[in-house]
Amino acid sequence: MTDNFSWLHRGTVEIFPQATDKTTETENLEYLLTNINRPLRVKLGIDPTSVDIHLGHSIPVRKLRAFQDAGHTAVLIIGDFTARIGDPTGKSDVRRQLTEAEVHENAKTYLEQLRPILDFDTPNRLEIRYNSQWLAKLDLANILKLLSTMTVGQMLEKEGFDLRFKTQNPIFLHEFLYPLMQGYDSVAIEADVELGGTDQKFNIAVGRDLQRHFGQKPQFGLLTPILIGTDGVQKMSKSLNNYIGLLEHPNNKYQKLQAIPDNLLEQYFELLTDLPLDSLPSEAREQQKLLAWEVVKKFHGEAAAAEAKKAAESAGQQGDIPEFSLSGVEFPARLASILNLSGLCKSGGEGRRKIQEGGVKLDGEKVTDSEATFQSSEELHGKVLQLGKKNFIRLV
């Protein structure tokens, strides 16, 4: 294990509890890392509430990898039970409850999406757990026991609940169970440290309280920043269409990353790469290119990064791809028609011919079906439509 803690503090907003003059050395995470004679159990929970993960979600996962590299055990919890409730954090309204089948479908690709980040191969460095293994077994008596550990007043201190209560926006009782169940995950796996974004501090603190209640040593909480999205204003989110998905084609990733606003570049380098921040190029444009290269290489390999770079350069736009609004397109719509409406082709017939000739790509993938049809604009939003080698548009 290492006592150089630069890896611990890079991209870390807060570690709690913080050691003070009144606390003991064992209440300091750095002291624990240096002196403990076993690997720490470091918890990160991910709820499969949708089919894919974006770069914002990857930040605590990267921190989990840093703990692995320092010799500790990553405990990745797939929240297949808690996802059915949905985390109310940051929500102004109750979330729709997912069915077991929906959660199972969403979770299918989660581990593959995380494979480029986490160490899946070194023995004893990764545990993958599903919280239905213990939460589904809780009977009413145990649920009542969990509920008895918190008061309504304590629960209303949670950000979001307080606002909804003050604005008389309904809070349903099952939503109170979410932080308790996420906290109980820490009890079930006996976590030493729990990772999460800054919006997860309440939930992590509940885990500490429950561990104390069940006679365990309370875990440390480590909070990472919330990544700002590609719009440069709001947090990265699928609902805001300012995200970069881990499943996106490398060409699309590259194009989006090399257009990141200048004021976000340092944050993106700190949170999404391992490059020393004092060795970056001086010009913002070169930083954008380097950022795109590093992130695409991490997830797809050097060959894919080289191909994505070549595609971006051949576009002649250096990331400034013209946009075409889908708001005027009547769906269902054939891709050939969109080629026509966007101005890439003179007619739908020409669009079909170009597809048949192999000259059309969508997010870097060649389209082979000349009758390819899309049911809604959501299926295409944010994707790059390419005709030939030099004609690109982004569908918005």
Image: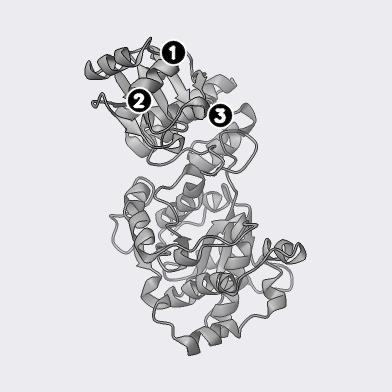
Based on the displayed image, in which of its 4 quarters is residue 176 positioned? bottom right
Please name whichever residue, 80 or 283, is drawn nearer the observer in this view of the structure. Answer: 80
The residue at 28%/55% (across/down) is 121
Question: Marks 1 and 2, how far apart in space?
Answer: 12 Å
Mark 2: which amino acid?
Answer: Leu
Mark 1: which amino acid?
Answer: Gly
Disc 1: which residue: 343
Based on the displayed image, in which of its 4 quarters is residue 124 positioned? bottom left
Question: Marks 3 and 1, how far apart in space?
Answer: 27 Å
Label 3 Cα crowd, 10 Å radius (few <14 / some 14-19 / many 20+)? many
Callout 3–callout 2 Cβ contact below 8 Å:
no
Question: Marks 3 and 2, how far apart in space?
Answer: 28 Å
Q: In the image, residue 88 lies at what x, y percent? A: 58, 62
Q: In the image, residue 349 lies at what x, y percent? A: 30, 14
Vertical placement of 233 versus 144: above or below?
A: above
Q: Earlier in the sequence, mark 3 or mark 2?
A: 3
Q: Residue furthest top?
A: 346
Q: Secondary structure at mark 2?
A: helix
Label 2 Cα crowd, 10 Å radius (few <14 / some 14-19 / many 20+)? many
Q: Secondary structure at mark 3?
A: loop
Disc 3: which residue: 260
Q: In the image, residue 286 lies at what x, y percent? A: 52, 21
Please name whichever residue, 314 or 342, is drawn nearer the observer in this view of the structure. Answer: 342
Disc 2: which residue: 335
The residue at 77%/65% (across/down) is 166
Please name whichever residue, 372 or 109, is drawn nearer the observer in this view of the structure. Answer: 372
Q: Is residue 22 left or right of residue 149?
A: right
